[in-house]
Amino acid sequence: MLLSLQNVSLKSYHRNIETTFLDSINLDVESGEAVGLIGETGSGKTMLAWTILDQLPISDCVISGRIFFKNKEMTYSRSELKGRDISMVFQNPMQSLNPIQTIGKQFSFILMRRFNIIKEEALSKVKQWLSRVYLDIGEDILKRYPHQLSGGQMQRIMIAIAMSVKPKLLIADEVTTALDANLRKEILDLINELRTEEKVSTLLISHDLLLIKKYCDKTAVMKAGRIVEFSETELLFKKPKDSYSQSLIRSLDFIKSNNFNKESEKQTLCSINNLFKSYISQGRKHNALININLDIYKNEILGIVGESGSGKSTLAKTLLQIIHQDKGEITLRIEDGSVISHHKPSKLLSAVFQDSLGSLNPRMTIFEILMEPMVVLGGLDLTSRTKKLNDCIDRVGLSTDLLNRYPHMLSGGQRQRVSIARALMQDPSLLILDEPTSSLDIKSQETILDLLQSLIKDTKLTILLISHDIRIVMETVDRLAVLYKGEIIEEEDPHTIYNTPKQPYTKSLIGAEYNNS
């Protein structure tokens, strides 16, 4: 047995308030085995990974029970295993990479320290591993800093780092969150290949049940800090015993036919005309957006899909005027019907980004975070603000019990829903969602998608939905644009694109998502 957890519990006593994160966990991972860990947001999956790695993000924690690694008890001495026998890829790669060092420098340093090799040999291995995770070395990846990369590129770098140290156990926490369907399959096939060749065990934490079903030998189901079921994956998906497991697996059926014939008056809210954006890195020009022409209509959900690094997040930031285009114009139609040039941040636009932790003030409670937009905008008394806050919290499926907590005390999915609630506080005309369901379990995804549909029906809100998950996009949007290497290569209703994709990339994206499940 490689890893064995026996009656492991984790409790916090922050500010004398007892919180149970893990409750009597029993879990075994054998050598060369792939074990999946599923459960809804906040069930304790990530906290379990942190406990195994002895890297808890909160203080005042007490661990009870016993943890064995290679039949040796490691309950209180697991630090020596990190980065050697155990590697982990976290949900948020930006938090794992040093922001003031280039990718090449920090990656090579890890290998030099791990294998006691010289810099030149380490750099050679770095290039090999980056190629294995499908990153183009010719794009000067080694000379870039983390902030100069897309979320998908950073995630692939973290996967490469984790696998390069040749661990005995790889813990992958939402490892494919920022990857499109093609890359998701390629990366998981690579991890599976490593597992077979090197006999590396994997603990795969994911909200993607189809992914778990395909790649894991055994699967554990978590709910409220407990493992409610643990069995062979095939058996679990065919005949789940626990009622919660049954409801979780039934939720796979939520992907249903969208109303592709939805009528719209097609009143333009936002127009993007001849938009170009480039970056200069290490003296070289990189085109992020190339001649983007796109209209966003009132009261619609427009979807943007594309591989990591295709320019999706750059487009979102340009629309928000967080960054400015090199050429081109963005115009907005305001309530009185007039058209204005959009060249600075506006309260008409609000956004939710991939990095939910980085976008929330760590020194503020959730209550303070949600109150802040209303305080800045003004116009409401305290009673009205509180009512609006409670309404938004309820809309996104969060408990008011979380309001006195800080961002680091929430799961990734809970933080994402807080971000969505905060964005709604300013009553925007256009809500830009960059991977809004990336950290959510499938039941919570359904809640958020239903929320988006209800917002369209009940308000004047328009939504731009950016996602790597083409299933979610197909389920939700009225119109779909495919972005590839900075260009929109096709734009149509999702039904047409699904049935008759025009471009080879679109065909491969749809095939990878729907044919491998």
Image: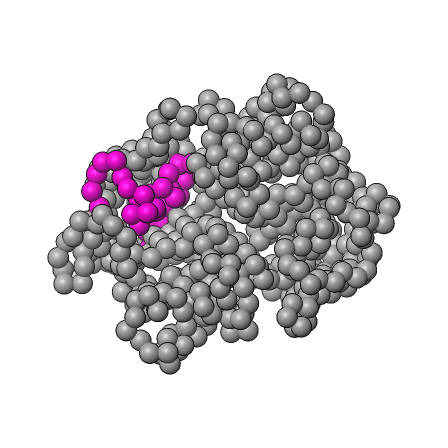
Q: Is residue 146 above or below residue 418?
A: above
Q: Position of residue 328 (x, y in %)?
A: 21, 38
Q: Is residue 154 left or right of residue 335?
A: right
State the residue at coordinates (47%, 58%): 361
Which quadrant would the C terminus be assigned to in this image?
top right
Where are the magenta residues, as a range?
A: 301-330
Vertical position of residue 491 compared to residue 269: above or below: above
Count how many numbered circles sit on residues in the image. Answer: 0
Q: Residue 461 in the image: x percent, y percent? A: 30, 62
Q: Quadrant of residue 60?
A: bottom right
Picture coordinates of residue 344, whole percent (x, y)? 25, 50
Q: With respect to residue 121, does 412 lie above or below?
A: below
- Tell me residue 124's x, y (percent): 60, 20
Q: Is residue 157 left or right of residue 319?
A: right
Q: Quick one: which residue is furthest to the bottom in this view?
A: 383
Residue 324 is one of the magenta-drawn residues = yes
Foreground of the two, 370 or 424 = 370
Q: Residue at x 63, y 62 (%)?
A: 43
Above or below residue 137? Residue 261 is: below
Colouring rule applied to residues: one colour
504 or 374, which is in the foreground?
A: 374
In the image, 425: left or right of 396? left
Q: Residue at x 62, y 29 (%)?
A: 109
Q: The N terminus is located in which quarter? A: top right
Residue at 55%, 39% (x, y): give it: 98
Q: Of residues 144 and 305, which is closer to you in this image? A: 144
66 falls in the magenta region: no
Decide if residue 193 is in sight here. Answer: no
- Residue 423 appears anywhere in the view: yes
Q: Nearer the viewer, residue 144 or 432?
A: 144
